[in-house]
Image (spheres, grey):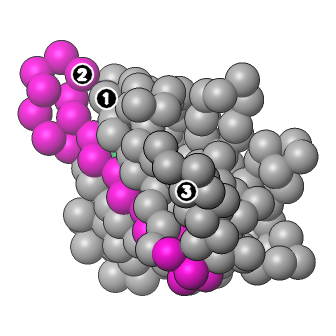
């Protein structure tokens, strides 16, 4: 790599995105799904965080497959908008048609991003969604909780991913 290239590419990361640079890239791993009203299941996942130079936003996408059969399962994509004050807003569109506006905080000293839905739209059952992401020892884990019309807020998903 030519001298100065690294500095140049670092400059291209928007200052608002810089604290979350460690997230950028493609992550792969396995997850587990559960909820009192359904049968538990296992899935594999590929999750991507990407950044266009100098934009204060991270593009997010996730695809999942049934761990046993390899059949595609849920997918979703959206945008993460971190602010310099440690708050973050996230919009996500799911393959089921459901949309989310999430607000929360990030603390990259602790390696934690915490999100709570401010809006869940076009959903027949889901009332609330929380997402907590953790970066630890180079691995990314998350827990997704949801509340439905019949069931109080509790875990639906957890996964552990490694960077490719
Ligand atoms: C925030 C993201 C998600 C939301 C809001 C969501 C929402 C839901 C809801 C409302 C149900 C029905 C629960 C009930 O009937 O009481 C459900 C079931 C289910 N979800 Fe998710 N889900 C999400 C992510 C995922 C992902 C990533 C996968 C796969 C990897 C997945 C796989 C399933 C499966 C297999 C069922 C059971 C379906 C059935 O038995 O008919 N979900 N989900």
Q: Residues within 10 Å of mark 2 (few under 14, many from 20)?
A: some
Residue 71 lies in quadrant: top left
Q: Nearer the viewer, residue 19 or 37?
A: 19
Task: Tell me the CA gap for discs 3 and 2.
Answer: 40 Å
Dots 2, 1 in contact, CB < 8 A: yes
Q: Where is residue 47 shown, x and y percent of the image?
A: 39, 46
From the image, tell me which residue sits under label 3.
Answer: 5
| Magenta part of the chain | 53-73
Mark 1 or mark 3, earlier in chain = 3
Q: Where is residue 157 shown, x and y percent of the image?
A: 49, 39
Q: Residue at x 34, y 36 (%)?
A: 45
Dot label at residue 114: none
Q: Where is residue 150 shown, x and y percent of the image?
A: 50, 58
Would residue 150 be seen by someone viewing this image from the given angle? Answer: no
Q: Nearer the viewer, mark 1 or mark 3?
A: 3
Q: Is residue 40 above or below residue 101?
A: above
From the image, tell me which residue sits under label 1.
Answer: 44
Q: Residue at x 44, y 37 (%)?
A: 27
Q: Residue at x 50, y 61 (%)?
A: 148
Please indicate whether residue 99 sits to the left or right of residue 53 in the image.
Answer: left
Please indicate whether residue 4 sits to the left or right of residue 49 in the image.
Answer: right
Dot 3: element: helix
From the image, tell me which residue sits under label 2.
Answer: 67
Whether ligand 1 has any atom under 8 Å from the Cβ at mark 1 is answered as: no
Q: Is residue 87 above or below residue 106?
A: below
In the rendered image, which quarter contains the C terminus? top left
């Amino acid at each position: 790599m030519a001298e100065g290239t690294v500095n140049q590419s670092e400059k291209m990361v928007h200052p608002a995105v810089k604290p979350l640079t460690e997230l950028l890239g493609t992550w792969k791993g396995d997850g587990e799904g559960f909820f009192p009203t359904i049968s538990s299941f296992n899935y594999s996942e590929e999750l991507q965080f990407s950044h266009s130079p100098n934009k204060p936003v991270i593009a997010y996408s996730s695809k999942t497959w049934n761990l046993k059969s390899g059949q595609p399962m849920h997918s979703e994509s959206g945008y993460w908008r971190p602010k310099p004050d440690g708050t973050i807003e996230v919009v996500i569109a799911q393959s089921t048609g459901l949309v989310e506006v999430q607000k929360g905080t990030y603390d990259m000293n602790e390696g934690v991003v915490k999100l709570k839905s401010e809006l869940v739209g076009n959903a027949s059952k889901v009332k609330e969604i929380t997402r907590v992401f953790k970066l630890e020892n180079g691995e990314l884990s998350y827990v997704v909780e949801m509340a439905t019309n019949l069931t109080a807020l509790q875990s639906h998903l957890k996964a552990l991913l490694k960077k490719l």
